[in-house]
Image: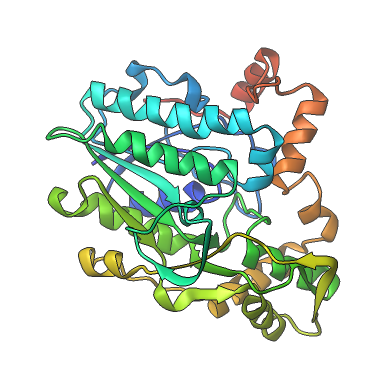
């Protein structure tokens, strides 16, 4: 298939894109490249791409594709809280508009990267795809809204699928440190402390970004009737953990560290465990390869190799919200988080690859 991947230079996209190519697909990327200066280790892949904000996509950008894998968006809760209206504009309104344009262009498959954060306050019971939504952040609410509106576009010619990813982890050229396992291993490696900012009781399902990518590839290749207008929790039933359990895994992985709770640590109302049986049952090609212990070891090895410092992962080099605030203060971005014209031109001459 010829596939457009939005957010191909993001945390998940930078890992998923080469896996799609290895699976035999022709891939074109679309990314505003806000994090071009945040590359961790090896640089992102060299593929045909459009440097473009998802809000500015035009019909002509979508010509000739069989499928769209939509990953682009403001990726975490602190960024969403920076300006909730922008989160809805980018993650919700622009996503629905992209789906409508895709349908108008004649694209058959539209796979949306949703999130288990839409379950929000779900407690300790395992939730299936049929569970009620209780999102508590602009990010989670935006995912819920997109699913509801794009589902209404489904018909005989346009087939959306919604993959609700568990909390991601794992090494990527565009590594994120605001994700629980990535974050705790980073604290342990750089300070000797597995630093927990909650009371450790909330539940989280976690999944490696390579396994997320495998789920997208499996959904893309599945018979239409199996995935048409369907939602799937993406993860592994045995990989639901309380935060304190993840902390213990990190303690056992990183030598010489200890667990420490923040002085103001309290309960986190975001608490959910997810049942991923539907994905395993309906898409048997999805064969996850990772678990938390193996992921913690991968992260620890990567941090050692690069000599990660506390300043790196807590500062604007890799921290998403810190980097965005830095670009804003430098005048590189305008208040809508679009590149200013002169900066966009400079970045294009340095970085952008031809789109063919």
Which quadrant of the view contains residue 251? bottom right
In the image, residue 63 lies at what x, y percent? 28, 22
Residue placed furthest toward the top: 341
62, 342: nearer the viewer: 62
Task: Tell me what residue is drawn at x 29 percent, y 27 percent.
Answer: 102
Q: Is residue 278 above or below residue 145?
A: below
207, 47: nearer the viewer: 207
Q: Is residue 22 above or below residue 288?
A: above
- Is residue 61 toward the left or the right of residue 135 in the image? left
In the image, residue 202 lies at what x, y percent? 62, 69
354, 135: nearer the viewer: 135
Task: Tell me what residue is drawn at x 77 percent, y 61 percent.
Answer: 308
Q: Is residue 264 above or below residue 145?
A: below
95, 211: nearer the viewer: 95
Task: Tell me what residue is drawn at x 41 percent, y 64 percent.
Answer: 211
Q: Looking at the image, how many numbered discs can be counted on the residues?
A: 0
Which quadrant of the view contains residue 303? bottom right
The reply to whether residue 321 is in sight is: yes
């Amino acid at each position: 298939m010829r596939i457009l991947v939005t957010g191909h230079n993001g945390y998940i996209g930078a890992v998923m894109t080469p896996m799609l190519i290895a699976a035999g697909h022709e891939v074109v990327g679309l990314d505003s490249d806000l994090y071009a200066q945040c590359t961790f280790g090896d640089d992102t892949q060299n593929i045909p791409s459009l440097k473009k904000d998802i809000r500015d996509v035009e019909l002509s950008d979508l010509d000739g594709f069989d499928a769209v894998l939509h990953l682009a968006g403001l990726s975490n809760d602190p960024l969403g809280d920076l300006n909730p209206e922008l989160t809805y504009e980018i993650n919700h309104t622009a996503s629905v508009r992209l789906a409508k344009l895709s349908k108008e262009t004649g694209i058959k498959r539209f796979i949306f990267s949703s999130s288990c954060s839409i379950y929000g306050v779900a407690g300790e019971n395992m939730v299936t795809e049929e569970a009620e939504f209780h999102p508590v952040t602009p990010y989670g609410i935006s995912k819920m809204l997109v699913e509801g509106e794009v589902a209404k576009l489904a018909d005989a010619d346009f087939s959306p699928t919604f993959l609700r990813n568990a909390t991601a982890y794992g090494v990527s050229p565009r590594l994120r440190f605001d994700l629980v396992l990535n974050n705790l291993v980073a604290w342990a490696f750089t300070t000797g402390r597995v630093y927990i900012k909650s009371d450790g009781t909330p539940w989280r399902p976690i999944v490696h970004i390579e396994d997320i990518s495998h789920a997208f590839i499996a959904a893309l290749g599945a018979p239409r009737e199996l995935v048409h207008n369907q939602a799937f929790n993406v993860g592994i039933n045995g990989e639901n953990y309380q935060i304190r359990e993840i902390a213990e895994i990190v303690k056992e992985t990183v030598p010489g560290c200890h667990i420490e709770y923040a002085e103001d640590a309290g309960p986190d109302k975001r608490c959910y465990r997810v049942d991923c049986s539907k994905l395993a049952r309906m898409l048997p090609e999805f064969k996850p390869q990772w678990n938390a212990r193996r992921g913690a070891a991968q992260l620890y090895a990567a941090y050692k190799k690069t000599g990660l410092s506390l300043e790196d992962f807590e500062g604007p080099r890799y921290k998403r919200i810190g980097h965005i605030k830095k670009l804003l203060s430098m005048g590189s971005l305008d208040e809508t988080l679009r590149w200013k014209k002169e900066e966009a031109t400079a970045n294009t001459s340095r970085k952008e690859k031809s789109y063919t």
